[in-house]
Amino acid sequence: METIYSYHHLREFTHEVFIRMGCSLDHATLATEVLLSADLRGIDSHGIARLSGYVRLWEAKRINAKPDIKIVHETPSTAVIDGDGGLGLVVAPFAMEVAMKKAAEVGTGWVSVKNSNHFGIAGYHAMMALDRDMIGMAMTNASPLVAPTFATERMLGTNPIAVAIPAKEQPAFVADFATTTAANGKLEILQRKGEEAPVGWIQDKNGNPSTDPHELKSGGALLPLGGDREHGSHKGYCLGAIVDIFSAVLSGANYGPWAPPFVSFLPLAPDPVGEGLGHFLGAMRVDAFRPADEFKANMDTWISRFRAAKAVPGKEVLIPGDPERETYHRRLEDGIPVVDSVVKDLQELAVKFDLNF
């Protein structure tokens, strides 16, 4: 079962929770916007369902509510940022602003981040570049829940990649996807609904296919995009590895199996190889390549032609970002559905912080 809440209601409650954690007004406002952008775009696994997890990480002193986010190394087009243990919801937008400033000055900007935490949906950060006639990119490493092809050990996170490309009259092209067959949050949703997982999402601790959404609790692992070798899981493994290296090896964050888990009850690796989680963000000024209006007009043509491609019966060809954009407008007007187990978590947060949910 689920209950519909208005965006305004969830925004006010979430904002107040971040304030009670000790975040500044600006940081609480930004973190709320980033977090709820996931719910508005239909990515429920990364939205308000994660709020109690952030609180638990803060209680475990793994999130610094008042971080001193700073550049620790830079060139005209690159930078490394230390997030000081802050909310990734705040650290990543700071990094993207740095990337866009560098892009405005020299054409492109690339920023790798260390000492951060879970940053919500990658698409939000990539989309920050759209209004400036820039192409945005965002990726992050994450809790090690994924077994490489032919492995039984969890070595990588779901490690998402997002790319946002502006158009002129058409809506922007926004690709935002995990490098696994399914994100962990999708398993959490299935657990709440009491449903099985499709074959190809997870394996048990011995590497056998499984449909049990609770399999990770028994030593199982998520599978790279493709599910198995015959369906190209080695390519998903490569994509996840690239994200891990760009986000963490490049910045000095923890990588691979050393990446800190999102859940607070799991211990941190005893022999860390870096600091916190890592992100990688980039911005490219379109007119560093060709006049922006020409490019965006060509993007309109590209999008229109692909949207008009002959479809199989009963289906339509979509452009990356179409479903999320439609969901955004519908939920902003009609409200956001929240499943009962998440409602219970929010009610417990209300009691903890003496709030009214």
Image (cartoon, rainbow, N blue to C red):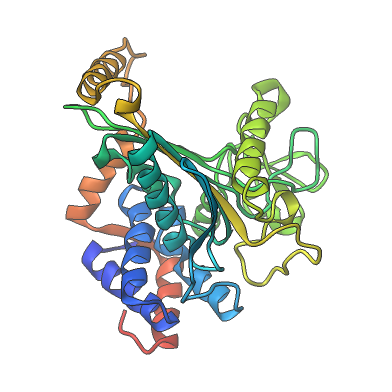
Query: Vertical placement of 190 versus 64: above or below?
Result: above
Q: Which part of the image, by quadrant, shows the C terminus?
A: bottom left
Residue 114 visible here: yes
As drawn, is 170 to the left or to the right of 237? left
Query: Vertical placement of 289 versus 338: above or below?
Result: above
Pick whichever, 357 or 172, lies toward us. Answer: 172
Query: Vertical placement of 33 versus 306: above or below?
Result: below
- Which residue appears at 60% of the width and 73% of the height? 62
In the rendered image, the residue lying farthest to the top is 310
Task: Tally the numbered discs.
Answer: 0
Name the spot of residue 223 as percent of width and height, x first. Answer: 67, 39
Q: Residue 203: which quarter of the image?
A: top right
Pick whichever, 35 or 292, lies toward us. Answer: 292
Residue 175 visible here: no
Name the spot of residue 57 as percent of width and height, x first. Answer: 57, 73
Query: Vertical placement of 78 versus 144: above or below?
Result: above
- Which residue appears at 43% of the width and 82% of the height? 22
Name the spot of residue 284 as percent of width and height, x first. Answer: 39, 34
- Which residue appears at 61% of the width and 41% of the height? 246
Pick whichever, 91 or 39, lies toward us. Answer: 91
Name the spot of residue 219 as percent of width and height, x first. Answer: 77, 54
- Which residue appears at 33% of the width and 25% of the height? 318
Q: Residue 313: which quarter of the image?
A: top left
As drawn, is 328 to the left or to the right of 111? left
Q: Which part of the image, by quadrant, shows the N terminus?
A: bottom left
